[in-house]
Image (cartoon, helix red, strand yellow):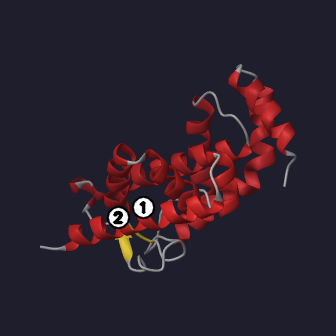
Amino acid sequence: MPDSREITRLLRQMDEGNDMARDRVFVLLQKELYALAVKAMSRERGHHTLQPTALVNEAFLKLAQKGDVKNRIHFMAVAANAIRQVLCDHARRKNAVRHGGGLQQVSLHDRAEHMSSPVDLLALNDELVKLKSLDSRQHTIVELRFFAGLTLEEVAEYLGISISMVRKEQVKAMSWLSARMDAGKSP
């Protein structure tokens, strides 16, 4: 894993418009981003036309436009959001009537045992937006744990709260999301 201080320094330079710093950040974190993309795509069903490398490249383009990324953990949080946005944009294009519709499915089983069935990525994204307006910390925890794959310790450090609080808030958030997603399946 790359040195956190170097990443932080490069991110500051990147925020100031330094293209060489941006390229260096990409090189240093490319393996982590690729692993994140592979993990995100492994949750989807069916034959996905988007490849992990393309997902990383599209997500990094979104990341490069963002400013004020503080450190590696923050970068991975922003990366997770960018990957989710790219996957949702891709799902929307695939679901368009002119493309014949169909839902992109993801599974939340590796982050919440009680949400083991596949769910619609777009519906999940909509519910995450609602969760953010209700409880931004719970939203951030879900995003960091599920989409960025950060550990409880990393999330606690990022948010400045205890590990037990992260665990408690994650359970609440996942229960809320599970109930919302289950309600959406009802006729």
**Is residue 76 toward the left or the right of residue 94 in the image?**
right
Residue at position x 66%, y 47% in the image: 158
Is 54 located above or below residue 182 in the figure? above
Is 165 located above or below residue 13 in the figure? below
Q: Position of residue 91 (x, y in %)?
A: 37, 57
Q: Position of residue 21 (x, y in %)?
A: 79, 30
Residue named by callout 1: 173
Residue 41 shows in the view: yes
**Is residue 139 toward the left or the right of residue 98 in the image?**
right
Q: Position of residue 30 (x, y in %)?
A: 74, 51
Quick one: label 1, few (<14), some, or many (20+) residues within 10 Å? many
Residue at position x 58%, y 30% in the image: 65
Quick one: label 2, few (<14), some, or many (20+) residues within 10 Å? some
Instruction: From the viewer's side, name the closer residue of 30 and 118.
Output: 118
Q: Secondary structure at mark 1?
A: helix
Q: Residue furthest top?
A: 16
Mark drawn on residue 146: none
Residue named by callout 2: 176
Mark 2 near mark 1, Cβ–Cβ under 8 Å? yes
Separation of residues labelled 2 and 1 (CA atoms): 5 Å
**Is residue 107 toward the left or the right of residue 126 in the image?**
right
**Three-letter amino acid code at disc 1?**
Ala
